């Protein structure tokens, strides 16, 4: 029932019928330390697995609760998660990852992109790039998480720099500093960052012909880690604005 509520809440333009159904659905609550969300292909599973391994509860890795890739910040019940984290990164590299793992079409449905029949969806990454459309809805997904009003703060972290010790250490302090001591957080930081294998999905240079370049430019001008408040404004900046 909670999964249905999250799906309905993710609909950008809600009809009267959807609004009425949301009002009828009971609100179900369960406790978790951290809610992790992303548009996929940016290390969400790795971070979730790592936190779970160290006793930090997160939303379901299987995404049966529809929170892992929901396209806008959901309403959390009480008690809500102690920390909400949004991971993002190079859009094209993310999509290349979806194609490499064979779930591009189904991932596009999760992120509320343009709904097509499966046989109409580009079969390869190159076909997707040549089509030149944002079928995953990345623009709205990122914008919703960056600036939508919420009733909680959101930690925004860039995948490409998350593996740097200074960045991941600060992320851990925000996510679990209330239950983990400084020494344990340092050990966790070392363990996670030293285990980074690098991206397995690379984007050929000739595929970077304009698709998502403007979105990537917005990301490049944000700090690698910052906290946005309930109004969508940056409150804490833990990195430099240009991290070239």
Image: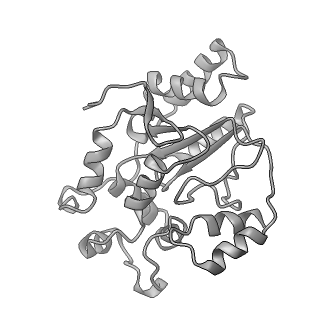
Q: Nearer the viewer, residue 51 or 155?
A: 155
Is residue 167 positioned above or below 29 on the image?
above
The quadrant of the picture occupied by the N terminus is bottom right
In the image, is 8 to the left or to the right of 133? right
Q: Is residue 8 left or right of residue 206?
A: right
Q: Residue furthest top?
A: 183
Question: In the picture shown, does residue 89 fall above or below 2?
Answer: above
In the image, residue 226 above or below residue 17: above
Q: Nearer the viewer, residue 176 or 53?
A: 176
Return the x and y of residue 113 as percentages of the image width and height: 45, 70
Residue at the (27%, 76%) spot, across then down: 131
Depth check: 183 or 176 in front?
176
The percent coordinates of residue 115 (x first, y second) are 46, 79
Say if 238 sits above or below 63 in the image: above
Q: Position of residue 180 (x, y in %)?
A: 70, 20
Q: Residue at x 26, y 31 (%)?
A: 242
User: Quadrant of the image for the C terminus?
Assistant: top left
Q: How is the image coloured?
A: one colour
Tally of numbered discs = 0
| Residue at image point 63% right, 67% down | 7
Please state the horizontal and vertical placement of residue 54, each as a whole percent of the image. Answer: 71, 31
Q: Tell me where residue 114 sits by quadrant.
A: bottom left
State the image quarter where residue 167 is shown. Answer: top left
Q: What residue is at 72 percent from the left and 75 percent from the top?
A: 21
């Amino acid at each position: 029932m909670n999964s249905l509520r999250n799906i309905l809440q993710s609909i950008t333009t809600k009809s009267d019928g959807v609004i009425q159904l949301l009002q009828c659905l009971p609100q179900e609550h369960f406790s978790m330390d951290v809610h992790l969300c992303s548009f996929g292909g940016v290390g969400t599973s790795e971070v979730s697995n790592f936190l779970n391994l160290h006793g930090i509860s997160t939303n379901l890795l299987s995404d049966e609760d529809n929170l892992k890739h929901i396209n806008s910040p959901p309403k959390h019940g009480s008690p809500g998660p102690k920390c909400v984290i949004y991971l993002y990164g190079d859009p094209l590299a993310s999509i290349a990852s979806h194609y490499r793992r064979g779930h591009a079409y189904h991932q596009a449905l999760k992120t509320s992109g343009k709904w097509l029949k499966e046989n109409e969806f580009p079969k390869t990454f190159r076909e997707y790039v040549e089509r030149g459309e944002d079928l995953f809805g990345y623009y709205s997904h990122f914008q919703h998480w960056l600036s939508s009003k919420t009733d909680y703060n959101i930690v925004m972290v860039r995948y490409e720099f998350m593996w740097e010790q200074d960045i991941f250490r600060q992320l851990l302090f925000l996510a679990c500093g209330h239950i983990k001591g400084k020494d344990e957080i340092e050990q966790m930081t070392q363990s996670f960052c030293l285990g980074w294998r690098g991206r397995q999905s690379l984007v050929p240079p000739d595929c970077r012909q304009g698709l998502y370049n403007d979105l990537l430019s917005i990301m490049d001008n944000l700090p690698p880690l910052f906290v946005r408040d309930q109004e969508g404004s940056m409150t804490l900046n833990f990195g430099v604005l240009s991290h070239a």
